[in-house]
Image (cartoon, rainbow, N blue to C red):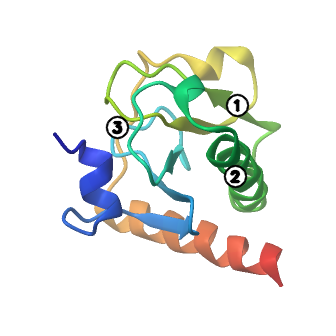
């Protein structure tokens, strides 16, 4: 069965797209714990991150690094926190979260963002991502 992430990758479900390449896609989390909370997902559906083959694993993390640079250029924060939990959706994914302290990585603290603001944030991060590639 296709995961919700595979449906997003196949353009069957919309998302707030940041960027994508041949191996991965990045989009804003719809249940964020911080402004700019982004998911980076491999385009092949594998439930457990460490079950990815070596090439896809390397490409996923290389892409995540570029996305994190774009997020940090867009959202004022000390760093980009990284989390891989893997129980919410049966499709490997990386959480990139703008943080100022360890306490900002609390997944119990969801925030609400208006649809206007989430679209603006996605566009701003996407524009900064494009600037990294130039």
Q: Which mark is residue 38?
A: none
Tell me which residue sits at (37%, 18%) in the image.
Answer: 87
Q: Which mark is residue 81?
A: 1
Q: Which mark is residue 31?
A: 3
Looking at the picture, tell me which residue is in the foreground, 5 or 23.
23
Tell me which residue sits at (47%, 70%) in the image.
Answer: 120
Residue labelled with disc 2: 59
Residue 74 found in image quarter: bottom right
Tell me which residue sits at (81%, 73%) in the image.
Answer: 132
Image side of residue 61 versus residue 16, left or right? right
As drawn, which residue projects farthest toward the bottom? Answer: 134
Using the image, determine if residue 61 lies above or below residue 72.
above
Q: Residues within 10 Å of mark 2 (few under 14, many from 20)?
A: some
Looking at the picture, tell me which residue is in the foreground, 66 or 114.
66
Which badge, 1 or 2, is on the more N-terminal residue? 2
Query: Judging from the image, what secondary structure is the residue with disc 1 in?
Result: strand
Question: CB of mark 2 within 8 Å of CB of mark 3?
Answer: no
């Amino acid at each position: 069965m296709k995961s919700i992430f595979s449906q997003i990758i196949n353009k069957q479900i919309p998302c707030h797209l940041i960027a994508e390449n041949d191996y991965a896609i990045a989009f804003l989390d719809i249940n964020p714990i911080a402004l700019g909370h982004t998911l980076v997902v491999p385009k092949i559906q594998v439930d457990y991150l460490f079950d990815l083959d070596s090439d896809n694993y390397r490409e996923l993390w290389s892409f995540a690094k570029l996305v994190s640079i774009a997020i940090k250029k867009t959202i004022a924060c000390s760093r980009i926190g990284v989390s891989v939990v893997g129980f919410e959706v049966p499709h490997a994914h990386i959480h990139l979260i703008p943080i100022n302290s360890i306490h900002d990585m609390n997944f119990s603290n969801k925030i609400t963002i208006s649809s206007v603001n989430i679209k603006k944030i996605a566009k701003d991060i996407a524009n900064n991502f494009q600037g990294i590639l130039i």
